[in-house]
Image (cartoon, grey):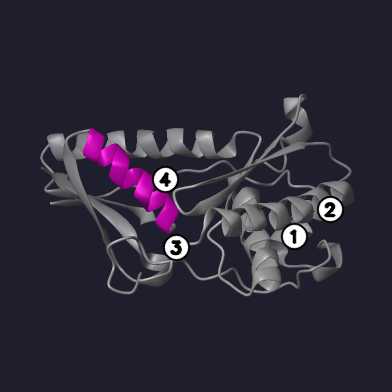
Amino acid sequence: MTEKIDLTEVNNAEVDITAAAAVEGDSAALPSGIAATDPSPDVPETGSVASIETPLTTDQLEREGDIAADYIEEFLDICDLDGDIDIDARNGRAYLSVKASDADNLRVLSKPETVNALQELTRLAVQNKTGSFSRLILDIGGSREAREAELAALVARAIARIEAGATEADLPAMSSYERKLVHDIVSASGYRSESSGEGRDRHTVITAA
């Protein structure tokens, strides 16, 4: 018996007008250097036949981070929000973290849907400057840590279903980055996982080891 696990996410109804415009693709509210367009396509996971890519150097990743930081800084100015931006480069990706001494200052922008939308827009801004697809990861106000906790809880629910007699458990569709996190969590729990489906329907299937 296959179990389908649903993931309930926080409602994003409180996004302010500027952030909402970014989510909806309103180019009038976007920082310079990027036009409203569809989100960038997902990158195939490591191990996929289609995922043969030339890894970026540390210098290239740091340049991505600098471009992204400029973009996010301009966006924060538009929203009249304060935030400190940290840049890191590891595991073949540039990581951008936005923090504020007052947690409430970034509360609206740290909503999961808003972070994902801003991440896609930031990747496009980087791509416009570098000419290469970006796999940059954006964190706002600890949003990624919160998401990792959600994924861990989701995996725990899936494993509980398997222990109760299900042969496998399908998780909702996710990005390659989130599926990689799920694979790591599942492996650490002593179970097996693999990705299934194509494009935006690609998701993780968990089975007993």
Residue drawn at (35%, 39%) of the image: 154
Relative to 34, is 147 above or below? above
Q: Is residue 120 visible?
A: yes
On-image quarter of the C terminus: top left
Relative to 125, is 156 above or below? above
Mark before the other along the chain sequence, 1 or 4: 4
Mark before the other along the chain sequence, 2 or 3: 3
Residue drawn at (71%, 64%) of the image: 24
Distance Cα–Cα, label 2 vs label 3: 29 Å
Residue topped by disc 3: 55
Question: Is residue 80 shown left or right of residue 47?
Answer: right
Q: Main secondary structure of the magenta part?
A: helix
Residue drawn at (10%, 40%) of the image: 165
Residue topped by disc 2: 74
Residue topped by disc 4: 7
Looking at the picture, which amino acid does disc 4 mark?
Leu
Question: Quick one: SS at disc 3?
Answer: loop
- Of circles 1 and 2, the one toward us is 2
- Label 2 with label 4: CB-CB less than 8 Å: no
